[in-house]
Amino acid sequence: MKEKINTLQFSSTFLLCILSSTIGLSLYTTIKIASIDTYISIAIGSVMGIIPLFIFLYIFNYEKDLPIYQKTVYIFGKFWGNMINIITTLLYFIIGMTVLFNLSNFIVSQYLSNTPLLLILIVFGITILHAINKGFETITRVSSIFVVIAVFFFLFSFIYLFKEFKFDNLKPILEFGIQKPILGGFVNMLIFLAPIYTLLIFPKNNIVDKEKINKYISFSYIIGFIILFLVSFLSIGILGKYLINLYQYPGYISLKRISLFKFVDRIENFLSIHWILCSFINLSMIFYYIKCNITKEKNSKIINLILCLLAIIISYKAFDNNTNFNYYTYKIYPYILGALFTMYLIIYIGDIIKKKKNNI
């Protein structure tokens, strides 16, 4: 990999990968677990997330500056290192299909109700194919533009929605104790931090101002958590206990309350574009990660095309309707994310054990 980027590009991609979960997966799943206490779950999840963040920074700053698939081979040897690479690749492929279907389903259900879902999947598949063909540098450069749009739209939405917020809608607080908010926080942490490990595919030495990277990543994490918290806090404060459980995309429904100058309505479709931009970057990074794990450093456009075609076909066939998809995101998807986090935890522990053996 000879591409060079700066810390702003890298941290922008990091932040957008986190924010992509707000389109539905994170908020919807956490609401199913913790209901009205979802914003408490997200606060708890952000504290829990310090551990995965630390693991990410540890692996990224590893003494051997290599892509993640080479680091695993260095730590565990060729056989077990490649086994870990295969497992993480398969898990990320499932996650990629999930995010792709969720994004396409959001477009169809909220924007283009008469458009076939397959057509939307194909459109995004072609766009993602173009992005991964261009490479990591192009994806991160686009991210540095998208992040400005996304953060601006989040701030704009917050300012206009705050007047609709009602504290009474947050009651009762912890009606069923703290157990469900803790569980919801753990699941939320897995959802919004799963995409960040795709950035480990890029060696640290390819960042021109790498000495700033830890600070930028930590700052991006804090910004991402604040936005996730505000989205959940405002959505619950606006919709209340009962309505929050009815909608698959409560954040989008809350945007319907915005009216400019008391006569410009229906701007939620414009404001929600930032979710699409975040998800596009997330998907681009996921499939770029998969491509690199398969082809190593070769930029095979044939492999890229096959990956995107498989993602479109399998996601379309696997999630034949929205009801099944919602059941999957609530009951099955957290275990897939948990398995992915376990892989990187194994890499972290494996390296610590190897260092201790070398010091004996």
Image (cartoon, helix red, strand yellow):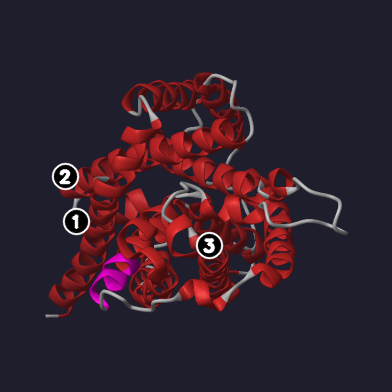
Q: Give the mark nearer the N terminus: 2 vs 3.
A: 2
Is residue 181 highlighted in magenta? yes
**Considering only vertical position in the picture, is 7 above or below 17?**
below
What is the crowding at mark 3: few (fewer than 14 residues within 10 Å), some, or many (at least 20)? Answer: some
Q: Do the residues bearing badges 2 and 1 touch, measured as CB atoms within 8 Å? A: yes
Q: Do the residues bearing badges 1 and 3 touch, measured as CB atoms within 8 Å? A: no
Q: Residue at x 56, y 25 (%)?
A: 120
Horizontal placement of 224 versus 61: left or right? right
Q: Give the mark nearer the N terminus: 1 vs 3.
A: 1
Name the residue nearer the viewer: 75 or 332. Answer: 332
Q: Mark 2 points at which residue?
A: 79
Q: Name the residue under label 3.
A: 205
Q: Which residue is drawn at 50% across and 20% down?
A: 118
Residue 197 circle label: none
What amino acid type should be assigned to the residue bearing mark 2?
Phe
Q: Residue at x 43, y 43 (%)?
A: 289
Residue 76 circle label: 1
Horizontal placement of 278 versus 55: left or right? right
For marks 2 and 1, give the CA distance. Answer: 8 Å
The magenta region covers 178-185
The quadrant where residue 106 appears: top right
Give coordinates of residue 270: x percent, y percent.
Answer: 74, 45
What amino acid type should be assigned to the residue bearing mark 1?
Phe
Prevailing secondary structure class for the magenta stretch in the rendered image: helix
Give coordinates of residue 63: x percent, y percent.
Answer: 37, 69
Q: Which residue is drawn at 67% across and 62% down?
A: 154
